């Protein structure tokens, strides 16, 4: 025996689909969806594994995507590792930082002459996460390997003072 509601649902599938899509796209429902999906995967591991085998992306796809999207892959990886902390960075942040810093190390104003057209760079947190900094766009800069490894998890002003003292000492010894 069908109810008036079930008859209406049968006659209006596009309305129902649109309502469901709106519900799924609402940011407030994201955690509910994730919890439901996680619960399903845990309760049905075989079905979830079979679905991924049939519909998931292949390893070759991911390897190719990472090779073609080096900067985006780097951000995805950082966002995943930093998921415990607050904040996420946007996909295009590295391109924007390269432009903003004119393809040079962020410390080029003081001493560094690294040119990122020819050298590798590190994505550095200006205020280190270990000291309470956030994993957000406005807390990132690009540093050459030498500057980033010597900075470590120091506050920016402490690092600059340390580096200036070191350079003054080197000049005095010559």
Image (spheres, rainbow, N blue to C red):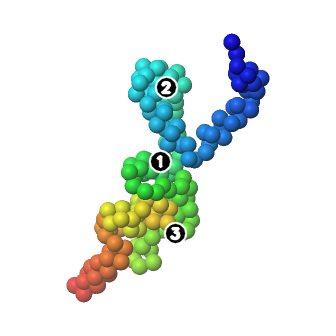
* Other residues around mark 2 within 10 Å, as few (<14) / some (14–19) / many (≥20): few
* Other residues around mark 1 within 10 Å, as few (<14) / some (14–19) / many (≥20): some
Q: Pick out the residue farthest to the bottom.
A: 172
Image spot of residue 94 (x, y percent): 51, 58
Image position of 143 with respect to 56: above or below = below
Instruction: Please tell me which residue is depicted at 42% across the width and 19% down the height of the picture.
Output: 46
Residue 139 appears in view: yes
Marking on residue 101 = 3
Marking on residue 52 = 2
Image spot of residue 4 (x, y percent): 73, 22
> Considering only order in the chain, which callout, 2 or 1, is on the residue closer to the N terminus?
2
Residue 117 appears in view: no
Q: Which residue is mark 1?
A: 76
Q: Secondary structure at mark 1?
A: helix
Foreground mark, 2 or 3, reads 2
The answer to whether residue 144 is left or right of residue 100 is left
Instruction: Please tell me which residue is depicted at 70% across the width and 31% down the height of the picture.
Output: 16
């Amino acid at each position: 025996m069908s109810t008036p509601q079930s008859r209406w649902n049968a006659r209006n599938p596009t309305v129902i689909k649109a309502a469901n899509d709106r519900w799924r796209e609402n940011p407030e429902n994201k955690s509910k969806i994730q919890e439901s999906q996680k619960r399903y995967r845990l309760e049905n591991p075989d079905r979830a594994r079979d679905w991924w085998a049939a519909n998931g992306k292949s390893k070759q796809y991911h390897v190719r995507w990472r090779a073609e999207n080096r900067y985006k892959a780097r951000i995805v990886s950082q966002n995943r590792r930093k998921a415990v902390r607050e904040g996420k960075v946007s996909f295009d942040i590295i391109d924007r930082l390269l432009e903003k810093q004119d393809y040079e190390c962020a410390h080029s104003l003081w001493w560094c002459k690294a040119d990122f057209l020819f050298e590798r760079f590190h994505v550095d947190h200006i205020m280190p996460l270990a000291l309470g900094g956030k994993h957000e766009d406005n807390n990132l800069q690009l540093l050459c390997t030498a500057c980033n490894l010597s900075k470590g998890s120091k506050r920016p002003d402490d690092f600059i003072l340390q580096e200036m003292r070191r350079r003054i000492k080197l000049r005095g010894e010559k």
